[in-house]
């Protein structure tokens, strides 16, 4: 590795050294309590898959370049030189961690391995050694934000083709528009993913609740966060903040995308609007009797997978269970403590890397498949696109025998007046 690059990487490392991160890097007691917290280690018990071992890859560089002993004693065993091998180790550590933070809740010091891995990911970005596809997807999102006026009309034309399906789920009343856009002063700005599945059910529920809503021109997913590039993460997030401010909305509702929700909720700073997940909004509509759902329209046991970024890291755990209580009498929780639920194994950009990560994603999430099977559920519900894709793959790989569904689509299909209207 050239000195010039090493210097750039260490500058990036130093930029991440907040007091909290320094505490994480200095505190590990090597007690090993976190080891079996990690779904990867639980499914594939190899030393390098323990959270502490992952963190150690970064910690050794910290000791070499930011601690006095490392600077003075070149052969100090706890320190490691930053070279091409170290970069390779950073890659293996960062992209075998889904950033689920299950280890953090069991560590007596609350060490956040995801945060330590964010240093590794940033160094890979600076060295241009990150998975190229994630950076390319982030760049596409950013350039869409820069040329929105060019694509607006095409987007609106595409929405017209979805209107009949929205009305099929919920018949409109006078004055309602199936999928409104550009509504100045709307109460809710809904940020969907690319694809009809993220727009049609949500639109039907907003219309049923008589919400004053408007659809964002941008897709929610933040590939900048997956790849660990803070500049790109911010640019992608700012497109939504600017749109929300331009329309002067009261609330931004994020679709079933865990990373998009956590990024906007926790990183957007003080804004004039609140940030909610669509699960929170649906629970609120039920509580306020703005929508009513038909119960037990599907047979068999139902279970729910908590997306890590929405549940453990975003605090939305009661709401999906509240919604499910209105949908079925046959709900079985897969974990006694939802905050300790296992990751699906697809987070941190692994699902977006597709076939390249398929074998690892399947093997490292065996514990998740076992957890689902133990519920004897025939319907597996979740509220995150990433989790949905990964759970579908697991379903095939482990022959789990479930149907995987989005919670929002179950809500839309169970709208009571919607059913009456169809009759
Ligand atoms: S954040 Fe999740 S995947 Fe990463 S080390 Fe901790 S438990 Fe394992
Ligand atoms: S539980 Fe915490 S202190 Fe113990 S080994 Fe894991 S990270 Fe280190």
Image (cartoon, rainbow, N blue to C red):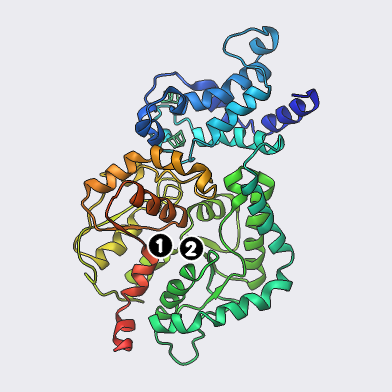
Horizontal relation, residue 339 to residue 346: left or right: left
Q: Nearer the viewer, mark 1 or mark 2?
A: 2
Label 2 sits on a secondary structure element that is: loop
In the depicted structure, whether residue 276 falls above or below residue 413: above
In the depicted structure, whether residue 66 falls above or below residue 387: above
Asked if the residue at label 1 sits under 8 Å from ligand 1, the reply is: no
Residue behind mark 1: 279
Task: Find residue 149 and report its horizontal and vertical position in percent.
Answer: 73, 72
Point out the quarter of the image occupied by ligand 2: top left
69 or 145, which is in the foreground?
145
Task: Find residue 303 and report its horizontal and vertical position in percent.
Answer: 27, 55
| Mark 1: few/some/many CA within 10 Å (<14, 14-19, 20+) | many
Determine whether label 1 and label 2 are within 8 Å by CB: no
Label 1 sits on a secondary structure element that is: helix
Residue behind mark 2: 255
Q: Residue furthest bottom?
A: 174
Task: Find residue 225 and report its horizontal and vertical position in percent.
Answer: 59, 47
| Mark 2: few/some/many CA within 10 Å (<14, 14-19, 20+) | many
Structural distance between the alpha carbons of marks 1 and 2 = 8 Å
């Amino acid at each position: 590795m050239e000195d010039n690059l090493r210097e750039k990487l260490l500058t990036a490392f130093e930029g991440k050294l907040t007091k909290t991160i320094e505490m994480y890097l200095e505190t590990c007691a090597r007690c090993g309590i976190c080891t079996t917290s990690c779904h990867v280690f639980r499914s594939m018990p190899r030393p390098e898959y323990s959270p502490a071992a992952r963190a150690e890859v970064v910690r050794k560089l910290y000791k070499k370049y930011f601690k006095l002993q490392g600077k003075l004693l070149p052969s100090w065993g706890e320190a490691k030189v930053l070279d091409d091998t170290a970069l390779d180790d950073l890659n293996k550590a960062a992209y075998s961690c889904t950033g689920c933070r299950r280890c953090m809740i069991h560590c007596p010091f609350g060490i956040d391995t995801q945060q330590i891995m964010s240093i590794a990911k940033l160094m890979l970005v600076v060295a241009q050694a990150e998975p190229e596809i994630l950076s390319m997807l982030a760049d596409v999102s950013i350039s869409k934000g820069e040329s929105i006026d060019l694509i607006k009309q095409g987007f609106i034309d595409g929405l017209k083709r979805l209107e009949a399906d929205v009305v099929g789920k919920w018949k409109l009343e006078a004055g309602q528009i199936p999928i409104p856009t550009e509504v100045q002063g709307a109460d809710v700005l809904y940020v969907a993913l690319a694809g009809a599945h993220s727009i049609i059910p949500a639109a039907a529920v907003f219309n049923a609740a008589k919400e004053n809503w408007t659809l964002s021109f941008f897709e929610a997913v933040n590939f900048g966060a997956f790849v660990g590039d803070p500049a790109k993460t911010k640019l992608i997030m700012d497109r939504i903040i600017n749109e929300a401010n331009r329309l002067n909305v009261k609330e931004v509702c994020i679709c079933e995308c865990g990373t998009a929700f956590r990024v906007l909720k926790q990183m957007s700073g003080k804004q004039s609007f609140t940030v909610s997940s669509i699960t929170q909004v649906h629970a609120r509509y039920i509580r306020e009797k703005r929508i009513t759902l038909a119960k037990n329209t599907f047979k068999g046991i139902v279970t729910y997978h908590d997306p890590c970024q929405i549940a453990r890291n975003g605090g939305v755990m009661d709401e999906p269970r509240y919604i499910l209580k209105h949908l079925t009498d046959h709900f079985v929780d897969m974990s006694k403590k939802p905050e300790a639920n296992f990751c699906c194994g697809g987070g941190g950009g692994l699902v977006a890397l597709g076939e390249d990560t398929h074998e690892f994603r399947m093997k490292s999430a065996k514990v998740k498949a076992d957890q689902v099977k133990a519920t004897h559920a025939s319907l597996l519900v979740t509220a995150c696109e990433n989790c949905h894709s990964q759970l579908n793959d697991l379903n095939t790989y482990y022959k789990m025998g479930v149907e995987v569904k989005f919670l929002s689509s179950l809500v839309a299909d169970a709208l009571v007046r919607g059913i009456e209207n169809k009759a």
